[in-house]
Image (cartoon, rainbow, N blue to C red):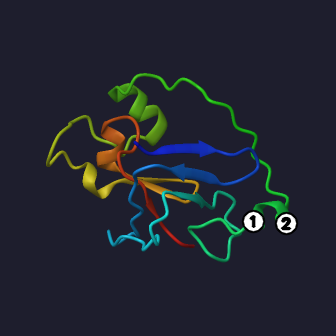
Amino acid sequence: MPAKITVSKNGPLRVEGDFELLDSEGKPYGLGGRTAISLCRCGFSANKPFCDGSHARQGFVSQVAALEMPPANQSHRRRCFGARTRATTGAGSGFAGYGVMVGEAALTGADMLEGWPRRVEWKSR
């Protein structure tokens, strides 16, 4: 089953299915055979990147609803990611040094080229 990520209202990201979770150095987390995990979205977890329920104790509020993302084109990337992104695409395009934080997720330049991440690496604070 492909990975499915559900954004919980006032809570974590629930990841289910076939996925791999990597740290910032590309090393995989040992998930003990789990096919579903919850990832912290509030930043309060003592066990980042995993959710420990701190969002409820801290009063984390984030009402979310699905939306339609605009097509992935260069003008969209410039609006969303700033002028530091470059107009070229493909290997060696210069995107490798760029990235953006989305909550706890770091999206690399290569992820931005496709308009949505192919791989998410989680960083502890």
Front position in the image: 38 or 32: 32
Task: Identify the residue at image location x=33%, y=72%.
Answer: 27
When the figure is inspected, residue 118 is found, relative to residue 39, above or below; the finding is above
Residue denoted by label 1? 53
Packing grade of label 1 (10 A; few <14, some 14-19, many >=20) is: some
- The quadrant where residue 2 appears: top left
Front position in the image: 119 or 99: 119
Q: Amino acid at mark 1?
A: Gly
Percent coordinates x, y for residue 22 in the rendering: 39, 66
| Element class at badge 1 | loop
Task: Identify the residue at image location x=76%, y=40%.
Answer: 63
The CA span between labels 2 and 1 is 7 Å
Q: Amino acid at mark 2?
A: Arg
When the figure is inspected, residue 124 is found, relative to residue 87, above or below; the finding is below
Q: Is residue 29 left or right of residue 124?
A: left
Residue 57: image tag: 2
Question: How many marks on residues?
Answer: 2
| Element class at badge 2 | helix
Packing grade of label 2 (10 A; few <14, some 14-19, many >=20) is: few
Task: Identify the residue at image location x=66%, y=54%.
Answer: 12
Would you say the residues marked 2 and 1 are in contact, meaning their CB atoms lie under 8 Å apart? yes
Percent coordinates x, y for residue 47 in the rendering: 62, 75
Percent coordinates x, y for residue 119 in the rendering: 36, 51
Query: Which quarter of the rendering shows the C terminus?
Result: bottom right
Front position in the image: 103 or 55: 55
Residue 27: image tag: none
- Residue lying at the far bottom of the rendered structure: 46
- Residue lying at the far left of the rendered structure: 92
